Image (cartoon, coloured by chain):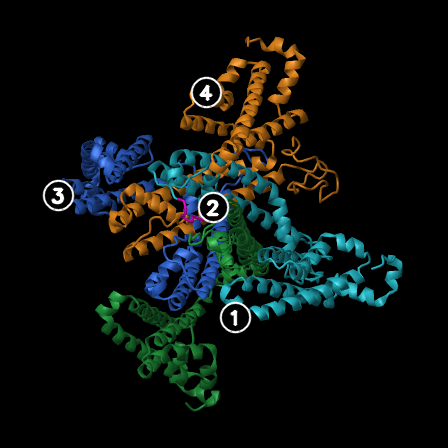
Chain colours: A orange, B cyan, C green, D blue
Amino acid sequence: MSNTAPAADHDNPLKKKLREVIFGTETPAGRHFDLALIACIICSVALVYLDTVAEIHQAYGTWIYLLEWLFTLIFTVEYGLRLYCSTNPLRYSLSFYGIVDLLSILPSYLALFFPGANMTLVIRVLRLFRIFRVLKLLRYLSEGNMLLRAMLESSRKVFIFFFSVSLIVMVLSAVMYVIEGPANGFTSIPKSVYWTIVTITTVGYGDITPQTSLGQAIAAFTMLLGYSIIAIPTGILTAEIGQEINRNRDLRRCANCLKKGHELAAHYCDNCGSELEAPLSESTD
Amino acid sequence: MSNTAPAADHDNPLKKKLREVIFGTETPAGRHFDLALIACIICSVALVYLDTVAEIHQAYGTWIYLLEWLFTLIFTVEYGLRLYCSTNPLRYSLSFYGIVDLLSILPSYLALFFPGANMTLVIRVLRLFRIFRVLKLLRYLSEGNMLLRAMLESSRKVFIFFFSVSLIVMVLSAVMYVIEGPANGFTSIPKSVYWTIVTITTVGYGDITPQTSLGQAIAAFTMLLGYSIIAIPTGILTAEIGQEINRNRDLRRCANCLKKGHELAAHYCDNCGSELEAPLSESTD
Amino acid sequence: MSNTAPAADHDNPLKKKLREVIFGTETPAGRHFDLALIACIICSVALVYLDTVAEIHQAYGTWIYLLEWLFTLIFTVEYGLRLYCSTNPLRYSLSFYGIVDLLSILPSYLALFFPGANMTLVIRVLRLFRIFRVLKLLRYLSEGNMLLRAMLESSRKVFIFFFSVSLIVMVLSAVMYVIEGPANGFTSIPKSVYWTIVTITTVGYGDITPQTSLGQAIAAFTMLLGYSIIAIPTGILTAEIGQEINRNRDLRRCANCLKKGHELAAHYCDNCGSELEAPLSESTD
Amino acid sequence: MSNTAPAADHDNPLKKKLREVIFGTETPAGRHFDLALIACIICSVALVYLDTVAEIHQAYGTWIYLLEWLFTLIFTVEYGLRLYCSTNPLRYSLSFYGIVDLLSILPSYLALFFPGANMTLVIRVLRLFRIFRVLKLLRYLSEGNMLLRAMLESSRKVFIFFFSVSLIVMVLSAVMYVIEGPANGFTSIPKSVYWTIVTITTVGYGDITPQTSLGQAIAAFTMLLGYSIIAIPTGILTAEIGQEINRNRDLRRCANCLKKGHELAAHYCDNCGSELEAPLSESTD
């Protein structure tokens, strides 16, 4: 685990190959490794999930226990390899993904020494955060890129929208608390805020419902408000996605007649018939 | 049921006519046959549905029984005719629709020999799959085509969206299970996943609701998340449908001045006034 | 109530004036009459609604009774005037609106002779249909026109969408009935259809909820389906409304430079500065 | 508190500086003051909210009481400064925001003399209206401006939509009241209106649910209606926001080649390469 210099590291072909496979996503092998890793993460998390079902725990508890150790071993080997082939093992082990990778294997080992059931579960759940590593893959999908850009572009508008909505929620919660009161389930304003969000998002559990006529009238108003303002983030995002699609089409220019705005699926310029280069964002896909 | 050669078959005018009516959708007779078949399928399925209502079963059970046999006979005759007029009866009987057609008549005959009530119902429900034959008709509606194309175009983006949402659902489910626990109805993580989906899709049955303050806060966050991310698939699909409409308009080009982008309802070029040909996708309608 | 000839009728200035006010909406007086009528309809319907609240009925029952007779008298006078000033009283009295107008005053008179409480209520509720007369006014709002056109344009696509959804609902209902069965509230397939619609539209009453694990999994799938396909009608309508707005802008052409596509609020051509004529659909507003 | 002449007031540099900070939002100091004020309002409202939770009231009641007096003092000083530096103190104190500012400090002082618990709470809740002062800030965000313009542009269409929906709700409510009746929870038509709104907005509490088959069929129709008409306001707003984005892009014109329609983030004309001026609506941001 010596912190070797990058120059010397560069000459070791095994390390370089491993780094390409484990950290890289440009080569087919690197992508297959990532897909296999995702499968392992999903399976190991599925085991944790199924183990919480009492019947499954009783019937297959031992098998799940063995499989979990198998996955823990796989992740341990993977963590070791990442440390070995990283150009800078210390920086990796202290990076966000390095800590997540360590946290995904620690719980099983800690459970050997601290057999408290609840605590084991809480730390095992931390393995879930490893799924976020999967999100790294999304970057290589042009569609994911486009969605992310559209969301970033509209984030300020959406923030203003949610700020306005939360002001409305705060006012409505206080009004409902005063009208309905603790007797009808609105025991405090924070509980009333919970009710208002349940109502304005049109979830409507029905665990707390207004009982007075005035309360029901304000509840009806809240519902109609929530029902209609859902149009606003949708409108914002739709407009941005439409812009993104047009922008993506504009990136390609016919080398012959200079026409812009070709569709992403087009291979030939629809004006002069000369061949187009492949779309920029999909060339790495 | 001899597997005659297509050439000899081509000369039999009755078979050819029958094939046009039963398998084809180009002639008026073929389309009327399909509509009559849809009516029969819907009626026979409606009978199965109504028969499960205890009061209707007691009052009209015998009539429903007789009507079901009538529909079974109709479907049997139809199946026989399909076998008879098909250019390749064996291939038809082993095709997806051939098996669905057979499965839609088998349950009634099987019920004669195996009178177990539950089993009969399960296999009778299989008749429902015949409805999918109806979907064949949708192909001939240009609007259906446009919707399907828009959905296919956006399927990758929507898949990425649902992949991200399912990651969020998995994390939130584990967190809610740890916070609320079995005492408040979150008896296992799969149950917690069910609750998270009920909440994030804004369905909100209310059969499981958070009881702790922290759980209610996370539930409120889940609702707001579900309420706002519904904008994403809507935005994707809206942008694609808008593109499809523009693409459809671009398919028609004035033969005189070459202007593109006429509205679907237009009969004359709005630039030079010469008559336009009918829209491509609606010419068969 | 003599069926006078239109020619003779044309000469009577009182009838002509009354017809303009009562039937017409072009003159200010005609529009004020319509607005007053809407107010009367809404008030009289509000009375019927409030009278069903037990406390209000006990406290103000007599006042409501008197006010209802006042509105009945107003509507009777209005009906008489319509008959009097119509160019063809017989055709009016047999037209859709003529029958609705008669039905709106009949219940109160019938209640004198048939004092059965329930029956009176049912026929009084019919007065609600008079509200549809109000919808006539919407025609004169260009925005209403635009919305109606967009909805008509997208009606075929939306129909195909709802046809596909109802097929999915039918299949899911049968599957849920077989899985959950009468013991868990799915007493018949029609009840199961009701549950499926409650779930797929994300309403989620919670009066019937799946109890088995498989049922909850299919319920979760149904919710995600309903949550995502809501994007389809939204996408269709949004694209059509966008088209309508562009079409409306194209209706106005600058008389000087022939530029199209001005905004509805523009008074001068943004290309050459010459004055534009008023928008077509708003000129009658 | 003498109503000095604006001319004399103009010469006092302290007052002028204070006015810039307290009332203005153009200078950095003015904007920092507004942000600090928002923080104080949110904290003081959060205290009122938390104080209604019984456990928190018992544990930290004294601390909350002290903090509330601190915020009351801050707001009192702020009110005094506003009166002092205003060019017209009387007009300020009678303006909408002046009254709101006074109402936000009065409750705490009134509570000294009238210790009635409920009344104190009701008037303390009035402080919430101060949050609306925050909305003033939104004006300076170009995105907020764009959203507001899009909402104003679509307000007539949305009004027509809600008018039509309320007519449908009224008819459906009366029909459901007649079908289900008081025995199934539909005790009056106003209650039935509440149920219809709960259903059509897809909230679905489940506190009132239809029990008869006909009622469930109409409920299913109501849900499908609500599920599909949500597309209409979304479509309206999306089209308007798309128009607003295009309009905003058209506001910037290249000074060299006169090309319009540059993206908001662009710094150079994409046609001739000359530098563009900053977007209009963001220049004050």
What is the span of residues highlighted in magenta in the rendered image? B203-208
Residue depicted at x 55% and y 49%:
B238
Give C85 or C29, whichever is nearer the viewer.
C85
Disc 3 crowd, CA 10 A, few/some/many (<14, 14-19, 20+): few
Residue B100 visible in the displayed image:
yes
Q: Which residue is mark 4?
A: A110
Q: Chain of mark 1?
A: B
Q: Which residue is mark 1?
A: B59
Depth check, mark 3 against mark 2: the one in front is 2
B69 horizontally vs D84: left or right: right
Q: Which residue is mark 3?
A: D115
Q: In this rendering, is residue C230 above or below C80? A: above
Tag 3 and tag 2 share a subunit: no
A173 horizontally vs B235: left or right: left
Give D274 or C179, whichever is nearer the viewer.
C179
Q: Which quadrant is home to the C terminus of chain D?
A: top left
| C-beta proximity under 8 Å, tags 4 and 3 | no
Real-space Cα separation, disc 4 to disc 3, in angstroms: 57 Å
Real-space Cα separation, disc 2 to disc 4, in angstroms: 37 Å
Hey, what amino acid is under mark 3?
Answer: Pro
Which of the 4 image quadrants contains residue C47? bottom left
Q: In this rendering, is residue A138 above or below C230? A: above
Real-space Cα separation, disc 1 to disc 2, in angstroms: 40 Å
Residue C279 percent across, percent down from the top left: 49, 61
Depth check, mark 1 against mark 2: the one in front is 1
Residue D197 percent across, percent down from the top left: 39, 57
| C-beta proximity under 8 Å, tags 1 and 2 | no
Depth check, mark 4 against mark 3: the one in front is 4
Which of the 4 image quadrants contains residue D26? top left
Hey, what amino acid is under mark 4?
Answer: Leu
